[in-house]
Image (tube, rainbow, N blue to C red):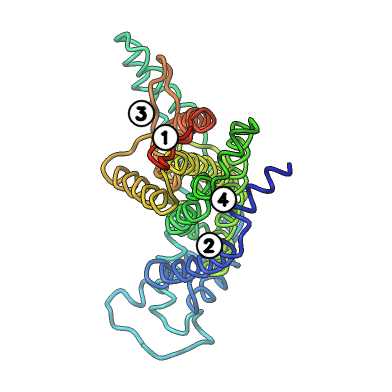
């Protein structure tokens, strides 16, 4: 434990790291606030107060007792603005927003469409299941075992779905598509871990470590230290993203099925929204840990901290560019924002069995971590000094 704490003091338990964390947290909030102002106007700012006043009258189980007056009012407002000749007087006692057109948008667009989605979702999921059942029979008939298994998996995942209640899940688009915090995590990894091995080379400490036979123990401690650091960053920034989403848009329906959020209409996962939040947390940790091991390996094979940081930034930049060209389960940067695997059905053929791509990616990252960790523990330090190579 002492050596683990010592390694953490050298990497992440530094004043500069905490200052950077505070700055990046503030930048993360500013970035999310800017996104809300431009993209998520439905429940942002003053309009959010109007939204939730009406939302509170209709949220929960959608009974006819709730829906009838809502539909009647929505139809009244639609008829009033249909010919585009309507009053623009401010009437706060008559309308939630104070204006007839504002209430029309509130009833018929902002909340009306969400209610329609909630009510009609079983039609969508059952249609997917029905198509999968037809495809299953076809591929079974022609002897294509893998495609038949895949369609059977789709059928099992999508059949008998329903949304039990209406909740405001509009915020999920902000939370699950927010990539900026993941970029900040990677920068903090480079800042905290790029000098993991190079500091010892520059100070000559590595000779003492080798002479005492603690090379593997020290390397393992650095790996464990980076894992703790990645866990902290994952929990901190995922928690901040959720808290900021609540402050800016209002987080509702965490216990609802993931597909109750419209962005997850075709998700293959029958988990709750809070379950998906933990999936994001777990995948973020594993992806960050994989990147941290890459940084440690670079630090081990480079002669000084400046070169290590430059190579680490270059490696991360290369991985980011690769995600723009193609999605690969072996690329940890792509797993920092796993919403692409959560929103659409996607699977990989593993030994003749269809396995969801998200699960395959997690397995791939785990294998990468094992391989990188083994290389770090076994690789030798090589630093050219006074004309000879030291090991």
State the residue position of label 4: 234
Q: Nearer the viewer, mark 1 or mark 4?
A: 1
Q: CA distance from mark 4 to mark 3?
A: 39 Å
Label 2: which secondary element = helix
Residues at discs 4 and 2 in contact (Cβ within 8 Å): no
Q: Residue at x 57, y 73 (%)?
A: 53
- Which residue in the structure is indicated by mark 2? 68
The spot of residue 259 in percent (x, y) is 49, 45
Q: Which of pointers 1 and 4 lies earlier in the amino acid sequence?
A: 4
Q: CA distance from mark 3 to mark 1?
A: 65 Å
Closest to the observer: 17 or 79? 17
First along the sequence among labels 4 and 3: 3
Q: Which residue is mark 3?
A: 131
- Residue carrying label 1: 389
Q: Rounded to the nearest whole Å, what is the CA distance between mark 2 and mark 1?
A: 82 Å
> In which quadrant of the rendered view does residue 129 lie?
top left
The kind of secondary structure element at disc 1 is strand
Q: CA distance from mark 1 to mark 4?
A: 39 Å
Kindly tell me whether residue 289 is visible in this rendering.
yes
Q: Is residue 246 above or below residue 255?
A: below
Label 3: element kind: helix
Q: Earlier in the sequence, mark 4 or mark 2?
A: 2
Q: Nearer the viewer, mark 2 or mark 3?
A: 3
Q: Residue furthest bottom?
A: 89
Please say whether residue 124 is visible from this viewpoint.
Answer: no
Residue 385 x, y percent position in the rendering: 42, 42
Q: CA distance from mark 4 to mark 2?
A: 45 Å
Q: Residues within 10 Å of mark 1 (few under 14, many from 20)?
A: few
**15 sits to left or right of 189:** right
Given this view, does label 4 or label 3 mark the residue nearer the observer?
4
């Amino acid at each position: 434990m002492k050596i683990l704490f010592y390694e953490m003091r050298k990497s992440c338990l530094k004043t500069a790291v905490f200052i950077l964390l505070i700055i990046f947290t503030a930048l993360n909030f500013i970035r999310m606030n800017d996104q809300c102002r431009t993209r998520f106007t439905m429940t942002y700012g003053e309009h959010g107060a109007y939204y939730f006043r009406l939302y509170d009258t209709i949220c929960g189980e959608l009974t006819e007792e709730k829906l009838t007056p809502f539909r009647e009012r929505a139809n009244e407002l639609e008829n009033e603005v249909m010919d585009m000749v309507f009053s623009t007087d401010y009437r706060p006692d008559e309308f939630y927003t104070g204006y007839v057109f504002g209430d029309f948008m509130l009833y018929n667009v902002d909340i009306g469409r969400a209610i329609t989605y909630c009510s009609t979702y079983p039609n969508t999921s059952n249609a997917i299941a029905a198509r999968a059942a037809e495809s299953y029979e076809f591929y079974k008939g022609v002897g294509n075992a893998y495609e038949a298994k895949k369609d059977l998996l789709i059928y099992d995942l999508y059949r008998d779905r329903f949304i039990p209640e209406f909740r405001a899940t509009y915020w999920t688009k902000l939370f699950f598509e927010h990539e900026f915090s993941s970029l900040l995590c990677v920068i903090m990894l480079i800042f905290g871990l790029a000098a993991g091995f190079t500091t010892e080379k520059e100070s000559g400490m590595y000779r003492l470590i080798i002479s005492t036979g603690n090379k593997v123990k020290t390397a393992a401690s650095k790996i464990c230290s980076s894992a703790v650091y990645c866990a902290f960053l994952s929990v901190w920034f995922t928690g901040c993203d959720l808290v900021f989403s609540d402050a800016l848009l209002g987080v509702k329906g965490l216990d609802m099925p993931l597909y109750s959020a419209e962005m997850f209409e075709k998700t293959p996962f029958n988990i709750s929204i809070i379950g998906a939040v933990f999936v994001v947390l777990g995948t973020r940790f594993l992806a960050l840990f994989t990147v941290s091991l890459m940084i440690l390996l670079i630090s081990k094979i480079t002669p000084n901290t400046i070169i290590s940081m430059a190579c680490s930034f270059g490696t991360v930049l290369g991985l980011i560019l690769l995600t723009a060209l193609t999605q690969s389960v072996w690329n940890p940067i792509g797993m920092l924002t796993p919403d692409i695997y959560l929103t659409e059905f996607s699977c990989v053929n593993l030994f003749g069995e269809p396995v969801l791509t998200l699960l395959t990616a997690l397995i791939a990252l785990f294998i990468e971590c094992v391989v990188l960790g083994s290389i770090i523990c076994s690789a030798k330090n090589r630093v050219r000094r006074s004309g000879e190579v030291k090991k």
